[in-house]
Amino acid sequence: KLTDKCVIATSGMRADALALHKHMQTRVKLYRSKFHKMPDISVIAQMLSNTLYGRRFFPYYTFNLLCGVDSEGKGAIYGYDAIGSYDRVNCGAMGSGSELVIPILDNQVKDHNVLDPEPPVDVTVVENVLRDALHAAAERDIYTGDNLEVVTIDHEGVRFEKEPLRRD
C-alpha cells in the first residue's frame, strides 16, 4: 500500500518486490514532504516507471500492476514491463497464471466476445469473477500461490481480504 488510494501489486522475486515497495514508499514520502500533498496515481505511475527504467541494467525481477483512484474518482490500473514501460488498462493480471486469468477477465469484465455486453454494476460481481478465475488458475498452474488477496480500492480507501486458494 503506497497511499490510502493506491496499491502496487507485484509478482516475481520476493526480495525484489519488498525492495521496490520500500523504495516507492520512500519516494511517496519525499513527494509529500516537498509538495505537502499526496501524489496523484498518475504521478506515482510515472515514479514507478522511472524507478524501473533506472534499474534497467540490473532490473527488479518483478511484474507490476499499479492500482488506485485517479483525480476524477475513477479506478486506474497501470501495467508495467520489466524496464518501466507502462500503459493504463481497464483490467490486468501479472504472474505465471495471468495467461489463464486474462481471457476470463476479458470475457466477464471487459465484455469482449459477448453478444449482449452488460458491464458489471456491483463490485461483488467483479470480485466473484476474480475469485473464480484465480481458483481456476491455481488448479492448473503450480506456480500460482496458495492464497488470494482481494484488494478493493474506492473512495472510502483500501480494503484487504485474504483467503486460501488451495485446500489440499
Image (spheres, helix red, strand yellow):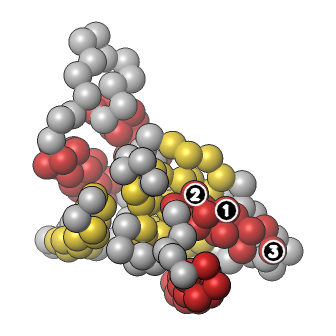
Quadrant placement of the N terminus? bottom left
What residue is disc 2 on? 42
Q: Nearer the viewer, residue 38 or 16?
A: 38
Earlier sequence position, callout 1 versus callout 3: 1
Binning the other alpha carbons within 10 Å of mark 2 as few (below 14), some (14 to 19) or many (20 upward) gives: some
Residue 153: x and y in percent read 30, 61
Q: Amino acid at mark 1?
A: Gln
Q: Which percent across, then down, holds residue 95? A: 49, 61
**Identity, as a three-letter code, of the amino acid under mark 3:** Gly
- Name the element at disc 3: helix
The residue lying toward the viewer, choosing from 97 and 33, is: 33
Within 10 Å of disc 1 (Cα), the crowding (few <14, some 14-19, many 20+) is: some
Q: Is residue 22 left or right of residue 60?
A: left
Q: Are marks 1 and 3 in contact (CB under 8 Å)?
A: no
Which residue is drawn at the image coordinates 65% and 74% (left, top)?
61
Disc 1 and disc 3: Cα gap in Å?
12 Å
Q: Residue under circle 1?
A: 46
Looking at the rendered structure, the kind of residue marked 2 is Ser
Q: Which residue position is annotated with label 3?
A: 54
The answer to whether any part of residue 101 appears in the image is: yes
Of residues 133 and 91, the one drawn nearer to the viewer in this rendering: 91
Residue 164 at least partly seen: no
Q: Are marks 3 and 2 in contact (CB under 8 Å)?
A: no
- Name the residue rendered at 41%, 60% in the picture: 68
Residue 126 to residue 16: above or below: above
In the image, residue 39 above or below residue 124: below
The residue at the point 30 percent across, 35 percent down is: 109
Horizontal placement of 51 versus 66: left or right? right
